Amino acid sequence: MSWSDFFLMQQELALILLALVLLVVEISLDTENKHKIIPVANFLFIPILVIGFLNTSTGSLFGDMYITDPTRILMKNILNVGVFLVFLQVSNWLKTQANNRNRISEFYLLIISSLIGVNYLISAGNFLMFYLSLELTSIPIAALAAYEQYKHKSAEAGIKMILSSAFSSGILLFGLSLLYAGTGTLNYGAMAIASVDLIQSMGFIFFFSGLAFKISIVPFHLWTADVYEGAPVAVTSYLSVISKGVAVFVLAIVLITLFGEIQGLWQEVIYVTAILTMTIGNLFAIRQKNIKRFLAFSSIAQAGFILLGLVGGSNFGTTAVLYFVLIYIFSNLAAFGVVSVIQNASDKENIYDYNGLYKTNPRLSLVMMLALFSLAGIPPVAGFFGKFFLFAAAAEAGMYVLLLIAVLNAIISLYYYLLVVKAMFINSNDQPVPKIESDFFARAGLILCTAGIIITGFISWIYEYMLNNSFGI
Amino acid sequence: METYIFYILAGAILIFALLSVTTRRVLRAAVYLLFALGSTAGIYFMVEFLFLAAVQLLVYVGGVVVLIIFSILLTSQINDRLEQPEWLKVMATMLLVVVGAGLSLFVIREYDFNISETAMTAPTVSDIGLKLLSYGPGGYVLPFEVISILLLAAMIGAIVIAKRMKEND
C-alpha cells in the first residue's frame, strides 16, 4: 500500500481534515467571536465539494474494507452537496439564537462527523465498517436533535431518536449475525448469498428492517414525525435528506451486489412496503397542521416512491433512484429552507401561519411553491422527471398494479401540497408573517436549491452520467 | 460436565435478563443486568476466548453497569417503583417474544451449519493487537480509526447536550 492509495479516500480524508481544522479554529476563537466559525466552515466546505469531482477511479483499500468507484463517488457528491445546502441554511439560526451562541462550532463538527460516517457507509466493503459508519451517521445527529435542550420537544426528539436508532441497530445486528452464521464472513465480496436459505432469508429480513428504520419505511416510521417536529429545522432537514438518502443508497448497493441472487425474496418485501409507505405517509400528511410534521409525513411518502426504483433491481431503476434523490435533496431542502427562515424570523411553524405569505414575502412563497411542486411532481420542475423515471422503472419491472397505486398516491399528494400553496397565495390573514430580510448564506442556499429544482430536470447529461455509472442485476 | 455448566450459565443469562426488564425498581434492574452480563462472560470463558471474557468483565460489568448504577443513584429516587404496565401490553409483548424466539430457534435448529475442519484456537492478545493495526487483508485498522472518530463525535455530542448558557447572558 503506497501513499497514493490514500487518494482513493479523498472525500473522507478531506472531511476529517476539515473537522480537525474547525476544532483548532474553535479553540482559537474567544467567547465573543464564536460566530466567526460560520463563514470559515461554509467556505472551507467548497473545496470538499470540488475534491469529490477530481478523482473518480475505482479501487479498494485495507483488504476490501473500503471500496470506491465512480458510482459511489457520485453518491457521496450528491449527499455532500446536500450538506453544503444545509450549512448555508443554518447560519442565520445559529447566529441569532442566543442559546446557541457558545455551541456553534459543535453543530458543524457533529454534522461533519455524521457526514464522514455517511461517506464511509457508502464505501463500506465489509459489514463491520457498514455497522460502524451507520452508528457514526446517527449518533451525532441524535445529539443534535436535542440541541435546543431547553425546549422540552427538542430534548424529547433527542431521546426518541437515540432509543429508536439503538433499537434499529439491534435488529440490524441480529440480521447481520444470522447472515454471518450462514456464510462465515462479513466481507461483501466473499459473502455470496446464493440460495434462499431459511437462515439467510431471516437475516435479510432483519437487516432490511434495521435499514428501514433509517429510511423511515412504514411500518418502521413511528419515530419520524416526533423527531422531525422536535428537532431544530436544520437537523430535521439533514435527517430528511442526508440520513434518508444514504440509507437508500446503501440499500441499493447491498440489494444488488449482495442479495442479487435472492431477488425474488426482496422484491416481495419491497413491493409490500412501498405500497404501505406511500399510502400511509400520504394519508397522515393530509391531517397535519404543523408544517414540520407535514414535511415529515411527506418525506415518508417520498421514501415509498423511491422504493419503486429499487423493486426491479435493474440498471435503469438504480439510475432513477440516484436521480430522484438528487432532485429530492434540492426540493426538500428548499422547502425546509423556507420553513427555517420563517421560523427563525417569527417562530411560527403551523400551516395556517403561512396564510397570506405571498403578500408580505413574495419571493419566499415562490421558492416554497416551486419546492412543493417539485415534491408533488408537477412539470416542468425537476420533481416531475424524477417521479417519471421512478414510475418508468416500476413499469419496466412489469409491476403495473404497483404503478397504479403509486400514481393514485401521487394524485393524493398533489392535493395536500397544493393546500399549502393555496394557504400562501389565496388565503387571507390578519396577521401574516412580517416581511423577512434573510442573510447572505440563507439567500444563497435558497437560490442554489431553486436553481437545482429548475435546472436538474433539463440538463440531460446529469441523467446520462448517472445512467452510465449506474449498476443493476 | 461442560454441558451442565453451559446450561446453568445460559439459564442464568435468560432469567436475569428477564428479571431486569420485568422488575419495577430501577436499581434492581441494573443489578440483574450486572448478573446477566457476568454470566455472558462465563460463556466466553467456557469457549476459551479469555481476552473477550476479560473485556466483558472489565468493560461491561466493571464499567458500564457501575456507570448506570451511579447515574441511577444521582438522578432518581431509588424507592420509586415504575408503574404497572397494562395487561394488554404485557400480553402483546409476551406473544411477540414467544413467537420471535420460537421462529429464531426453529430457523437456527433447521440450518445445516458448516463445521470447520481445522481446530479452533483462541486468538492471543498479541494476535488481536496486530490485527487491529494491520492494514492488509483481514486487518482492522480502518474500523479502528472510524471508531476513534465516532468516540470524538460522541464526546462532542455529550458536550452539546450538557453545555448551558451562562446565567448572566
Image (cartoon, rainbow, N blue to C red):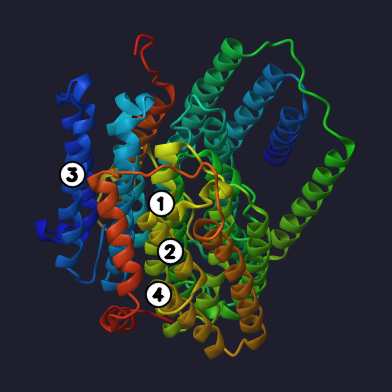
Q: Is residue A23 above or below residue A410?
A: above
Q: Chain of mark 3?
A: A
- In 3D space, how far apart are the residues under numbered discs 1 and 2 (Cα atoms)? 10 Å
- Residue A181 seen in the figure: no
For image coordinates 39% across by 69% down, the residue present is: A327
Q: Residues within 10 Å of mark 1 (few under 14, many from 20)?
A: many
Query: Label 1 belongs to which residue?
Result: A338
Nearer to us in this view, A15 or A395: A395
Nearer to us in this view, A472 or A367: A367
Q: Residues within 10 Å of mark 4 (few under 14, many from 20)?
A: many
Query: Label 3 belongs to which residue?
Result: A17
- In 3D space, how far apart are the residues under numbered discs 3 and 4 (Cα atoms)? 37 Å
Q: Is residue A278 above or below residue A287?
A: below
Q: Which mark is residue A441?
A: none
The reply to whether the C-beta atoms of the residues labelled 4 and 1 are less than 8 Å apart is no
Q: Amino acid at mark 4?
A: Val
Closer to the chain start, of discs 3 and 1, is 3
Q: Amino acid at mark 3?
A: Leu
